[in-house]
Image (cartoon, helix red, strand yellow):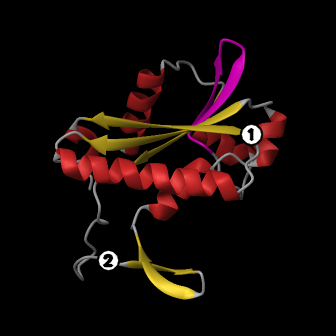
Amino acid sequence: MSSFESEEHAFKILGLKNPIISENELIKKFEGIRVPEALFNDNGTIVSVEVKRIIGNTLPLCGQGRRRIKRYVKGRERIVWPWTSSVETALSKLHSIIANEFCVNIHVAVFLIPEFLSNSVKERIIRHIKTIATTFLTYKTTSTKVKYFIFGCDDKYFDRF
C-alpha cells in the first residue's frame, strides 16, 4: 500500500475531509521548500497535516544489515534512535511562507505505528516519539502551534517496508 493510503487513513482518523490544497499542489506552488501532506479547513481552523509511518526501532535494511544513525550531541558522536530525523521533520514540515499565505492555525504531525508489534516495542516507539517531540518543540521555533498524534494501524499500511 502506498503512502497515499496511509495519509488518507490518518486524515480519516482525524476527521478531516476535502483538503483546501494537496501536497502535489503545494509542491507546484512552493517549489523548493518542504510542504505538508495537505491543508484542511476544520470548522474555521486551518490545519496543516504531515503523516509519518514509523515501522519499529530500526530502519529498513539496505543490504548491509542494521543501519546506525550517528549525530553529534554535546560535542560527541552518539548513536541516536533511527527515526529521530523523521519525527523532527514531521514536526517542522510547515514552512512559515505556507503558514502565512494560508493563515494556518495549527500544524498536526501524525505518526502511524504498526499494531502487529509487541506492546513493549510499541511503548518504546511511543516513548521515543514523545521524547524527541518534547525536546524539539522546547528548543526549536515553529511557524505555528504544533500538535502530534500517535496511532496504531493495520500492517497493510506498512507492506512497502
Magenta-colored span: 36-49
1 and 110: which is toward the camera: 110
Q: Crowdedness of circle 1 by 10 Å Cα count: few (<14), some, many (20+)?
A: some
Relative image position of residue 25 (x, y in whole percent): 65, 38
Q: Which residue is mark 1?
A: 144
Q: At x 67% / y 41%, what residue is drawn?
A: 26
Quadrant containing the N terminus in the rendered view: top left
Q: Is residue 45 magenta?
A: yes
Rendered view: 12 above or below 133: above
The amino acid type found where label 1 is placed reads Thr
**What SS does tag 2 mark?**
loop
Inter-mark Cα distance, 1 to 2? 34 Å
Q: Crowdedness of circle 2 by 10 Å Cα count: few (<14), some, many (20+)?
A: few
The amino acid type found where label 2 is placed reads Arg
- Residue at far bottom of view: 76
Q: Which mark is residue 32?
A: none
Q: Which residue is mark 2?
A: 67
Q: At x 38% / y 29%, what residue is drawn?
A: 9
Rendered view: 9 above or below 18: below
Label 1 vs 2, first from the N-terminus? 2
**What SS does tag 1 mark?**
loop
Q: What's the magenta bit mostly, secondary-structure-wise?
A: strand
